[in-house]
Image: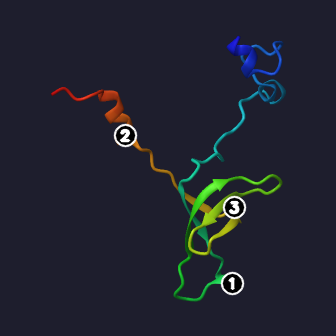
Amino acid sequence: MLLEEQIPTLALVNKTPYEVWFGQKPSIAHLRVFGCEAFVHVPKEKRSKLDNKAEKCIFIGYKDGIKGYKLWNPVTRKVVYSRDVVFKEVKNTSRNEDESKGPEKT
């Protein structure tokens, strides 16, 4: 039953329609962690000599029809769309390690 829910047709066993059509799995390299820090490049035309070359934002998603990322700038309180972004995706390993240890014994 689980297999039927994941694939739109039973004729494609363990493959998505994309895999059958193109002969390879789709790339997911452009996907990012929601809410992670992102640094958006500020073009030369929009900054002076001593201004920062990037603004710190928060990744909030994607927008249909635009190649790029949707970001929230907490300083200006505006949504920004950009393709020129560097992401700081930090994995929270300490939390996962604490959960795997289980409750402490006294």
Q: Residues within 10 Å of mark 1 (few under 14, many from 20)?
A: few
Q: Secondary structure at mark 1?
A: helix
Q: Amino acid at mark 1?
A: Glu
Q: Give the mark nearer the N terminus: 2 vs 1.
A: 1
Q: Quadrant of the N terminus?
A: top right
Question: Which residue is at 81% across, 13% downward?
Answer: 10
Q: Is residue 45 above or below residue 19?
A: below
Distance from disc 2 to disc 1, alpha carbons, whole Å, reads 43 Å
Q: Secondary structure at mark 2?
A: helix
Which residue is identified by label 3?
83
Q: Is residue 40 above or below residue 43?
A: above
Q: Label 3 near label 1: C-beta < 8 Å?
A: no
Say the numbered circle drawn on residue 95: 2
Which residue is identified by label 1?
45
Which quarter of the figure has residue 54? bottom right
Question: Which residue is at 76% across, 13% downward?
Answer: 13
Say the numbered circle drawn on residue 9: none
Q: Nearer the viewer, mark 2 or mark 1?
A: 2
Q: Quadrant of the C terminus?
A: top left
Q: Residues within 10 Å of mark 3 (few under 14, many from 20)?
A: few
Question: Which residue is at 64% across, 44% downward?
Answer: 29
Position in image of residue 89 (x %, y %):
50, 51
Q: Amino acid at mark 2?
A: Arg
Distance from disc 1 to disc 3, alpha carbons, whole Å, reads 17 Å
Position in image of residue 8 (x %, y %):
81, 22
- Residue in front for this viewpoint, 73 or 85: 73
- Residue in front for this viewpoint, 11 or 102: 102
